[in-house]
Image (cartoon, rainbow, N blue to C red):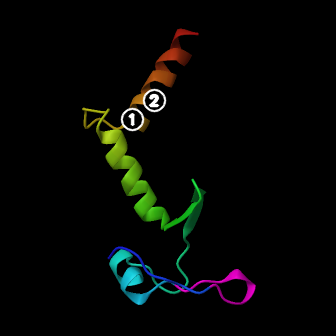
């Protein structure tokens, strides 16, 4: 799918094409993230945004170690030194 023409409805509402909703796994009532960037609107779900962020970060993080666990260990070690 590349592009679709939509008509702006009452109160500025748009309806996403069913094929797009199916492909993205959007269901009625889902929370979505809408971003305006460079004159374009992008729509995603929090789940897809987190997956995208993880893919981006995985390029820079080569270990399978939990960064949260590593940060907690660092903070505990720092507190023990004080």
What residue is disc 1 on?
67
Q: Observer-nearest residue: 30 or 68?
A: 30
Instruction: State the separation of the CA atoms marked 1 and 2.
Output: 6 Å
Q: Residue furthest right?
A: 11
Q: Which of the 4 quarters of the picture holds residue 47?
A: bottom left
Q: Residues within 10 Å of mark 2 (few under 14, many from 20)?
A: few
74 in magenta = no
Residue 13 badge: none
| Residue shown at the point (37%, 56%) measured from the top left | 51
In the image, which residues are magenta? Answer: 8-15
| Residue shown at the point (51%, 87%) measured from the top left | 28
Where residue 62 appears, x then y in whole percent? 25, 32
| Residue shown at the point (34%, 38%) measured from the top left | 66
The N terminus lies in which quarter of the figure? Answer: bottom left
Where residue 24 appears, x then y in whole percent? 38, 75
- Tell me the SS state at disc 1: helix
The C terminus lies in which quarter of the figure? Answer: top right
12 in magenta = yes
Q: Residues within 10 Å of mark 1 (few under 14, many from 20)?
A: few
In-image side of 41 versus 19 (left or right): right
Circles 1 and 2 in contact, beta carbons < 8 Å? yes
What residue is disc 2 on?
71
Where residue 43 appears, x then y in whole percent? 51, 68
Q: Which of the 4 quarters of the picture holds residue 59?
A: top left
């Amino acid at each position: 799918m590349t592009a679709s023409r939509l008509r702006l409805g009452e109160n500025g509402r748009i309806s996403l094409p069913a094929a797009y909703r199916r492909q993205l796994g959007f269901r009625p009532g889902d929370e979505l993230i809408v971003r305006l960037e460079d004159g374009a609107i992008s729509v995603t779900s929090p789940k897809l945004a987190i997956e995208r962020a993880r893919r981006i970060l995985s390029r820079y993080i080569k270990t399978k170690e939990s960064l949260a666990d590593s940060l907690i260990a660092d903070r505990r070690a720092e507190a023990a030194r004080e």
